Amino acid sequence: MEIRKLLLRAVVVIGILIVLGYGVFAFKGIIWGPRIILIAPQSGFATTSPLIIVSGRAIRTKNFFLNGATTTLDLAGDFSEPLLLSPGYNIMTLEGFGKYGRSKKKIIEMTLLTSY
């Protein structure tokens, strides 16, 4: 009888854990929201070339913007966009909006070095 109660409790606990685990998996877009992974360039980047390629991945985003302009993502969420820098200090803003109204913003600072 004691083993039967212990086995029943174990089955109930495992069932509850399975339901909770599935709930987290199913609602991860609501729980975690969008995520932006920037591959290149990193913040603090300095270059002598005015044209750079901004690349990375946007996860769980419905709309994605680079400096306020809509940017296209492939099926995996990867993006790669050319960006023309102004001489001196530049600020780039990446912003992603999720399906459930949450947003993520990344600000990257770069410097275009000029030689006179």
Image: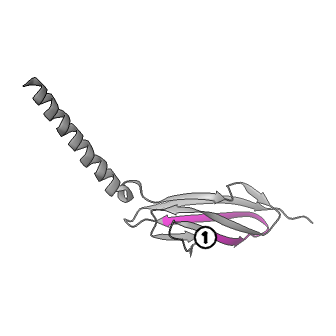
- As drawn, is 7 to the left or to the right of 75? left
Instruction: Assess whether residue 18 is covered by the magenta stretch.
Output: no
Query: In the picture, which quadrant includes the N terminus?
Result: top left
Q: Nearer the viewer, residue 67 or 8?
A: 8
Q: Is residue 85 magenta?
A: yes
Q: Position of residue 88 (x, y in %)?
A: 78, 64
Q: How is colour applied across the structure in the image?
A: one colour
Residue under the image location 41 percent in, 54 percent down: 32
Residue 59, x across and y down, in percent: 49, 61
| Number of callouts | 1
Nearer to us in this view, 32 or 13? 13
Picture quarter containing residue 8?
top left
> What residue does disc 1 label?
67
Image height of 10 relative to 38, above or below = above
Q: In the shown orientation, is residue 111 left or right of residue 5? A: right
Tell me if 11 is positioned left or right of 88 in this view: left
Give residue 71's position: percent from left, percent from top. Answer: 56, 73
Query: Which quadrant holds residue 27?
Result: bottom left
Majority secondary structure of magenta residues: strand
What is the x, y in percent for residue 19? 24, 48
Q: Which residue is the extreme one toward the right?
A: 116
Q: Mark 1: few, some, or many residues within 10 Å (few <14, many ≥20)?
A: some
Residue at x 64% of width, y 58% of height: 39
Q: Is residue 16 above or below residue 96?
A: above
Residue range (magenta): 80-96
